[in-house]
Image: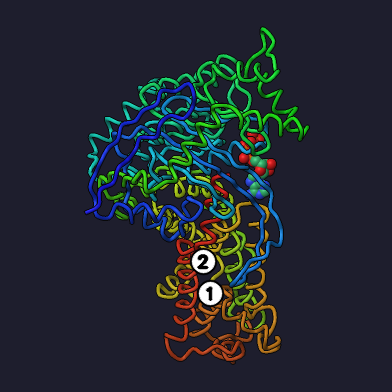
Amino acid sequence: MNMFFCRRVSPILEHLPVETSTTAITDDNALSDIVIQANDDGISHHRPSELRNQRDTRVSMDLTSKGTLSFHNIRYVVGERRKNCYLSCIKLKSGKKIINNVSGIFTSGMNAIMGPTGCGKSSLLDVLADRKDPHGLSGQIFVDGCPPPPSFKYIVGYVVQDDIISGTLTVRENLMFSANVRLPADVTNNERQIRVTKVIQDLGLELCADTKMGTEFLRGVSGGERKRTCIGMELVLEPKILFLDEPTTGLDSATARNVMECLKVLSETGRTIIFSIHQPRYSIFKLFDTILLMCKGKNVYHGSASAMLPFFSDRGYQCELHDNPADFALDILIDASRNPDDLRKLNQAYRQSPMWSNVNSLSQREKSNDQFEKLRRKQQGAAARSLGVEIYYVSQRTLKNAIRNPALFLSQIVVAIILGLLIGLVFHDMEKTIDPGVQNRLGAIFFIIISQIFSTITALEPLLKERALFIHENVSGYYRISTFFIAKLICDVLPMRVLPSIIFSLIAYFLTGLQRSVGQFFVFLLTIFMSSVFGSAICFFISALIPVFAVAFIVVVLILVIMLVFSGFLIKLASIFNWLSWIQWISAFRYASNVLIINEFRNINFCLSNMSSVCPMSGLDVLNRQALDYETDWDMWKYFFALSMMTKQILATFPNLTDDERETMRAKASK
Ligand SMILES: Nc1ncnc2c1ncn2[C@@H]1O[C@H](COP(=O)(O)OP(=O)(O)OP(=O)(O)O)[C@@H](O)[C@H]1O
């Protein structure tokens, strides 16, 4: 049995007291569980598939932990390319250094990362919160002296700069949603409600607890209340460490101060609050305990807020009497960012200070595994919510969203009525004549299928808007990708298509005078429904891959137009190049229209005129001319089956996006 010791990380900054307590636990598997986290550089490099598994067993941070985060020689380079080779690798392109050898320690209290725009504040925050693509990243991170557990990013709080939150839910409903899907199964419903109520009280949200957050169409809570709700979404987890990316951005000065005072109160309960901030006013600066100043990716000061002015004063920078210390420091950093010599001097001055020596010596001690054994974080063994429970809560929210935001659903109904009437009037009561009865029927069927598939593009924009929420929640470990997908399918995509398909079919089918039998009507209805589900599936898939509406729109249109060309209506498929004609097998237009053509032409005869009883042409002749088999029912249903399989395959690709695509999503979400 191995015994592991966790040395509480001694606060390294010269002004902070040094603590030397040790804790011992015994665990056979401790080391192996931790070592996953550390590579040669000391930084965790997980495959996304591992991350998915890690999320399945949520590990809670040891409740006795202090939430002390230390980081050593963090470097982050983007755009570096190396040649793939076996023995040695030649660097092809040196990348851009975003973070350059930054070390430090954050303990409980208010820890600010400050610096001019583009200095690397957000990047450092993301690295510390384990939200950066590990490619190009090196250095070491320890939490209470131990490498962070694999699920670190799921057990700390991270509040992104843009307040990404469901606008149709109230403050309380959003917090309850976070508690329901993120807290382990052993936290009872009653406990979850108590936690939410406490968070509402702690953040002073009582007055707006039952107000909706607000959307483009709905006036909701104020900016400060919105930000505090986003903080509350993380606080329901009771994290020891809370990261915030620019929490005051977009808020007026009074609201910004209110939010920061709220954070200060939270920090006084023993939490480590780490945030990036650009240019705080003095009343906000006063709330900081520790400051890390950055300039062009380099660290130029890391110490207590009160020691900052003396530090600069000792190095020849005097702050004027009524100047805001934050503005004073920022001016120094902006000047230094324009003058490489000044930046070098500042960086050197910091590196020669006692603060730097303390950070450095701690970093050396941290690396010595033989001196200080590592503690495996106490695993509470609480499993994350089961897939079924997640689907229940996410479906509940999706349904609430759809009901409270009926504009899209109503617009689909209106579009269905307009298209049904248009087709019904243009192809009104089609004659059963050879000319123009045959051509009109084929034209009507073609137009019906086009209108149904193309009209689903209206779903693209709402899907893209929801994408940001989905990515944020998935990356923050709210739920699995498949949960969102299944809930969306059951509570949004399918119901959204059922009623418009029925309305369209009732209007178009009977106005155009297609063959009136119950069986044929239901085949028509089913094909219309499946065509619109197919169109939605394409939009769903593209919205997952492409975040920009204009690009996503063009790609969807391009895909549909290519399928349209190979539908068999515009050109005889036999006359297309062999190497191109395979596209007909992935043309939804071809499959859907073939079902309707066989459905319509199988039992019909065409006469010379409306008055004539001479009907020399059978619908079967038309089917023969279209090169369609019709003898058995399977000849029709096989096209329906192909359309369904294509739809299923496209939808199934969404939760199975490759690791790389998900990794890109994580990186984008953290930006
Ligand atoms: N993936 C990337 N590719 C290229 N450059 C990047 C990437 N990520 C960050 N950068 C660059 O690194 C620098 C630091 O970015 P970061 O967002 O961390 O700065 P910041 O200090 O938070 O800025 P701001 O206060 O404006 O948000 C910027 O110049 C940014 O353009």
Q: Is residue 370 above or below residue 88?
A: above
The residues tagged by marks 2 and 1 sit, at their Cα atoms, a distance apart of 10 Å
Q: What element carries label 2?
A: helix
Residue 81 or 507: which is nearer the viewer?
81
Residue position marked by numbered label 2 in the rendering: 534
Q: Label 1 near label 2: C-beta < 8 Å?
A: yes
N-term mark: 2 or 1: 2
Where residue 622 appears, as percent x and y from the top left, is 59, 87
How many other residues sit within 10 Å of disc 2, few (<14), some (14-19) or many (≥20)?
many
Q: In this view, does 197 lie above or below 553?
A: above
Give the quarter of the image for residue 585.
bottom right
| Amino acid at dot 2 | Phe
Residue drawn at point x = 49 percent, y = 80 percent: 639
Residue drawn at point x = 60 percent, y = 76 percent: 441
Where residue 363 appears, as percent x and y from the top left, is 48, 40
Where residue 155 appears, as percent x and y from the top left, is 38, 42
Q: Is mark 1 on a helix, strand or loop?
A: helix
Q: In this view, does 382 lie to the left or right of 104?
A: left
| Residue 66 showing in the rendered view | yes
Residue 589 or 205: which is nearer the viewer?
205
Residue drawn at point x = 62 percent, y = 29 percent: 350
